[in-house]
Amino acid sequence: MSAEPTPLGVMPGGFSELWSRGNLLFVVPALREEYPEPLIESIACRRALLLGGQCDCGAECPPSALDPAQGNVAVVLHAADCPAEHAERLLAEWVSSGEGREQ
Ligand SMILES: [Zn+2]
């Protein structure tokens, strides 16, 4: 199976993207230029891990970890000080702040 991730498109709403790797489909959070810097950093770490197989913090996610046929539940732990750990909180804060809404 090819380990090269291929972008398929942006999901409705624009917050996530659909990618394939080999015969797998998976969704990763989109990077949006209007996001504040900490959120961009955090999401970049998530994407590096899912699309590139590893994060700067040392977390790794080989293609087999995403394959349901392997029977694995993909649990990936970033380091405690990795920005990726804050993605959900930062995104929720950004959404509730209203900055993402059209003027
Ligand atoms: Zn990380």
Image (tube, rainbow, N blue to C red):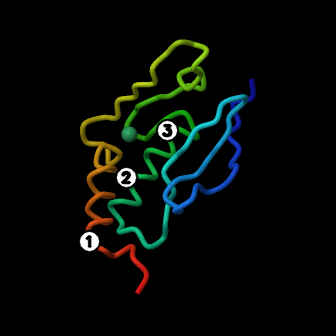
Mark 3: which secondary structure?
A: helix
Question: How much space separates mark 3 and mark 1, taking CA atoms?
Answer: 28 Å
Residue 101: x and y, percent?
39, 76
Element under disc 2:
helix
Residue at the disc numbered 2: 42
Helix, strand or loop status at disc 1: helix
What number is the disc on residue 97? 1
Type of the residue with mark 2: Ser
Residue under circle 3? 49
Badge 1 density bin: few <14, some 14–19, many ≥20, Cα 10 Å: few
Please tell me how crowded label 2 is: few (under 14), some (14-19), or many (20+) other residues with Cα within 10 Å: many
Task: Indicate the quadrant of ligand 1 in the picture.
Answer: top left
Name the kind of residue labelled 3 in the image: Leu
Q: Is residue 76 left or right of residue 7?
A: left
The mark that comes first in sequence, 3 or 1, is 3
x and y, in percent, of residue 2 in the image: 74, 29
